[in-house]
Amino acid sequence: MTEWFSVIPLGHSEAMHAIVIEDKKLAFREVPDPVPAEGEVVVDVTAAGVNRADVSQRQGFYPPPPGAPDYPGLECAGVISAVGPGVSGRHVGERVSALLAGGGYAQRVAVPAGQLLPVPTGLSLHEAAALPEVSCTVWSNVVDRDRLRKGETLLVHGGGSGIGTFAIQLGHALGATVVATARASKHDKLRELGADLVVDYTTDDFVAATKDFTGGRGADVVLDIVGAKYLSRNIDVLAPGGRITVIGFQGGRKAEVDLVELMAKRASLSSTSLRARPIPDKARIVAAVTRDVWPLVEAGAIKPIIHTTMPLSEAAEAHALMESSDHLGKILLLP
Ligand SMILES: NC(=O)c1ccc[n+]([C@@H]2O[C@H](COP(=O)([O-])OP(=O)(O)OC[C@H]3O[C@@H](n4cnc5c(N)ncnc54)[C@H](OP(=O)(O)O)[C@@H]3O)[C@@H](O)[C@H]2O)c1
């Protein structure tokens, strides 16, 4: 197998700009260039996705896993500018997107080669930057873990989130009936993306609405970002044999579970974190997403939903927008 050693192309200085966290605030600073370790490449970032997890990291609730860059940023797209030792089949100048454990809010980022995804045919680098975190999170939970099948009902909480807009499209593309919760101002767009029923969680009860819509059966799979506040109602809305996966805790982390209700429905309840998974597990997910999801993107069945793009130096404004929840889909930063 061919191996390339680290090559930093001419014209690159040894410093770059990145967003660092200082006293729970984001600051645009000059920092050292990343150097690719064994098995890594360096990507010159064209666009980086903003995720709710970055807001939690800034607030001090979600520290990066050991070995991950300190800077926030869980996904990007760009061009490979250096190839580290032990990496084969990658070359300087290749356009890629990447799932990151951190460090995307920067001009350059080092990433394990197994976490690179191709840029789907027909997509720009900006569009490709909106996909790695949502596609890998949603696929690993809804397909890999919860085995959503054609004809089943998927309930997506936070339908207007980056995660939600992707989950609605994937569920629809897989032939599921999709129910989503969101504020009313987002409903038209979510129907366009493939939601069969949209529930305004601020005024309506999603349990009653989902049961009514499914003839009393309920949801087979629930993808939940709310956590404690929704747990008992998520069990309530579940169809026999249903699966709940909790991936966010915006509504709290501690709740009581009625195990008898779970047992009676032969239901399963799980929770996962993509960022904390070992590198080989992420590589497995990335390969499966490339194989199973990218064809749906290339066919136009799933589109990157981009709310807005902002300069990297305005990352603090991007976080303020995300915290307002006035966005629908992804916010991107451009170094
Ligand atoms: N565990 C993992 O591996 C993993 C990976 C990625 C993301 N996540 C989690 O997934 C969630 C979404 O991430 P993101 O980056 O896509 O976030 P995001 O774009 O900021 O979206 C968050 C959305 O939550 C909605 N929301 C708030 N309270 C709600 C409620 N009670 N019911 C329904 N929707 C509600 C808001 O929509 P409205 O305007 O409709 O209120 C808001 O748009 C976050 O909690 C994040 O931590 C987990």
Image: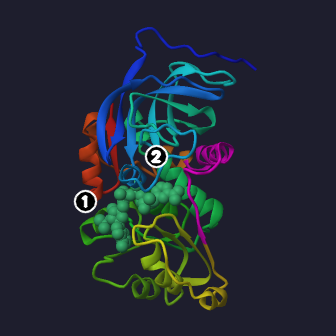
**Helix, strand or loop for disc 1:** helix
Q: Nearer the viewer, residue 276 or 307?
A: 276
Colouring: rainbow
Q: Quadrant of residue 327?
A: bottom left
Vertical side of 84 occupied by 76: above or below: below
Residue at 32%, 30% in the rendered image:
29
Splitting the image into four quadrants, where does ligand 1 fall?
Answer: bottom left
**Helix, strand or loop for disc 2:** loop
Residue 276 on the magenta span: yes
Residue at 63%, 15% in the rendered image:
5
Residue 249 pos. (x, y %):
45, 67
Query: Would you say residue 5 is visible in this rendering?
Result: yes
Mark 1 sits near ligand 1, with its Cβ under 8 Å away: no
Q: Please rate how many residues cluster around mark 2, counting C-alpha atoms within 10 Å: few if below 14, some from 14 to 19, many from 20.
A: many
Provide the residue designation for mark 2.
Answer: 131
Numbered range of the magenta stretch: 270-293
Provide the residue designation for mark 1.
Answer: 324
Residue 186 pos. (x, y %):
28, 65
Q: Amino acid at mark 1?
A: Ser
